[in-house]
Image (cartoon, rainbow, N blue to C red):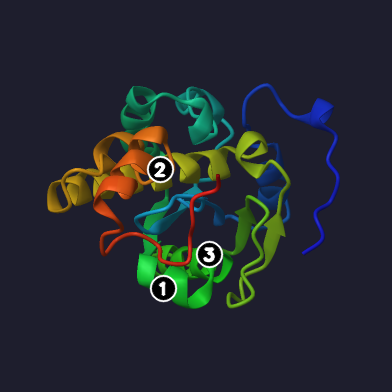
Amino acid sequence: MTRKKFDLALLPKFPDLTIEERLWQQGFEQVGGIDEAGRGALAGPVCAAVVVLPPDPSLTRTLGGVRDSKQMTARQREHWAPCIQEAASGWGVGFASPGEIDALGIVPATHLAAIRAIQTLSLTPEHLLTDYLRLADSPIPQTPLVKGDRRSLSIAAASVLAKTARDALMRELDEDYPGYGFAQHKGYGTPQHRAALKKLGKCPVHRKTFSLKT
């Protein structure tokens, strides 16, 4: 996919429902935002989430603290995740394992996690907004957005659910594989994680095809 140029000056101060409202006006009432977490980690799964918000412009106030998850603290994400779940018409989370990442590659595995998230929904989205993903295996119409998690409230909400779900799983893996510090760095290549890898080597939840950059 050729990445389109986007004028960063056009980014809203906070993610909003401008794009969703256009789709609602076109008759697409079930619009799902999709985002992922863990794509660049050295260990653990990649996680994707989908959030379908009802066609209600007032949600920009109800979910006024929701941002791209990378712009939020862990405490903020944990606060807003249940608010998103309560406000949404539907939401779902899907994972692709380290083994699937090694077998398929990170991009196809991310797509697989997104498809699994969609399959958990009790409703079928009529249109998908993605943070510049193109889900070739989904027949649902899609709009990939550059900087989607900073433009679309649905995508930003999905980024929060993906991040909190994956973080919770990494805390569980920290108990299963002590010594690596998964609860702290969530599998990313921090100095703490690098030191643990040098001392302990890789464990079963490390991605074998990912290597540390020197």
Q: State the image coordinates of residue 100 (x, y, percent, origin top left).
A: 41, 73
Dot 1 falls on a residue whose secondary structure is helix
Crowding near the residue tagged with mark 2, few <14, some 14–19, many ≥20 C-alpha atoms within 10 Å: many
Mark 1 vs 3, N-terminal side: 1
Rendered view: 44 above or below 106 = above
Find the distance from the CA under tag 1 to the CA under tag 3. Answer: 8 Å
Q: Which residue is mark 1?
A: 100
- Closer-to-camera residue (57/191): 191
Quadrant where the image shows the C terminus:
top right
* Amino acid on which disc 2 is placed: Lys
Say left or right for 89 vs 198. Answer: right
Dot 2 falls on a residue whose secondary structure is helix
Instruction: Name the residue at 83% across, 40% down.
Output: 6
* Amino acid on which disc 1 is placed: Glu
Find the distance from the CA under tag 3 to the CA under tag 2. Answer: 17 Å
Q: Which residue is mark 3?
A: 106
Q: Which residue is mark 2?
A: 163
Mark 1 vs 2, N-terminal side: 1
